Amino acid sequence: MSRIAAPIDTGAPALAFTHRFVPASATGLPPLLLLHGTGGDENDLLPLGRMLAPGAALLSPRGRVSEAGMPRFFRRLAEGVFDEQDVVRRAHELADFVAEARAAYGLPAPVAVGFSNGANIAAAVLMLRPEILAGAVLLRSMVPLASPPETVLPGTPVLMLSGAMDPIVPRENAARLADQLAARGARVEHRVLPAGHGLTPADMSAARQWLDLHGPAAA
Ligand code: MLT
């Protein structure tokens, strides 16, 4: 990742989330909404976004919740135990930010690429505000809401990549999230990779291939 050129910032307007925006340098690609994991920030996933969809616009907000100084997208009570009221509130805040950013930057609906906590908030946005995302790549995600509303995700493409040895996300939990999304109409591809919670080259190539297939169609 270190060989990838630093993204060019256009100067971010004052929107509700601190964020980075990198304009598109190619046409026909949906923007990526990059959502970092616990302790990350708006800079973390820009190299990943560049690698997954070269030339796509990148919108990368910083989570507004602080856990002992570590940014997150919603509060948790313990590892894997989420404050669901906060999940709902923060998912709506993030959805509103995406709508604001689309107007400010003139963007079509983005495809979310989220890691860990960022993947979990993306899953919550999909189920609470299904019109906001054109698709999602959920890396090491788990169920953010035990009983999400019966919204409709009309064929929204979702790639879930889980780790077979992930110590944070039980296999059953990731499978339950895939079922929740599919039951609401999403076209879910769920793959379990020989990996832990961290990302591997297999994640990169699976996500890139999937975006090549689904990205332009989703724009
Ligand atoms: C979470 O949302 O808490 C994640 O699944 C785990 C983490 O971010 O550390």
Image (cartoon, rainbow, N blue to C red):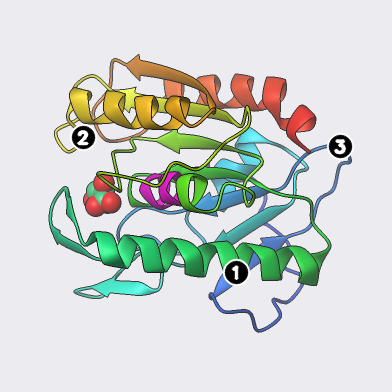
Which percent across, then down, holds residue 115? 40, 44
Q: In this view, does 189 lie to the left or right of 25?
A: left
Most foreground residue, 132 or 140: 132
Give the residue pinned by disc 2. Answer: 169
Q: Is mark 1 on a helix, strand or loop?
A: helix
Q: Do the residues labelled 3 and 1 touch (CB within 8 Å)?
A: no
Q: Do the residues labelled 3 and 2 touch (CB within 8 Å)?
A: no
Three-letter residue code for mark 3: Gly
The segment highlighted magenta reads 118-124
Residue 161 location, quadrant: top left
Q: In this view, does 116 lie to the left or right of 114?
A: left
Residue 139 disc label: none
Q: Residue at x 33, y 17 (%)?
A: 192
Q: Is residue 64 left or right of residue 110?
A: left
Which percent across, then down, holds residue 138? 44, 36
* Residue found at the very far left of the displayed protein: 78
Residue 28 disc label: 3
Give the residue pinned by disc 1. Answer: 97
Most foreground residue, 146 or 4: 146
Q: Residue at x 59, y 68 (%)?
A: 96
For ligand 1, tell me if the residue under mark 2 lies within 8 Å. yes
Figure check: 121 above or below 64 = above
Instruction: Give the CA distance from mark 3 to mark 1.
Output: 23 Å
Instruction: Give the CA distance from mark 1 to mark 2.
Output: 28 Å
Tell me the chief SS of the magenta region: helix
Q: Is residue 37 magenta?
A: no
Figure check: 118 above or below 185 = below
Crowd rating for badge 3 (residues with CA inside 10 Å; few <14, some 14–19, many 20+): few
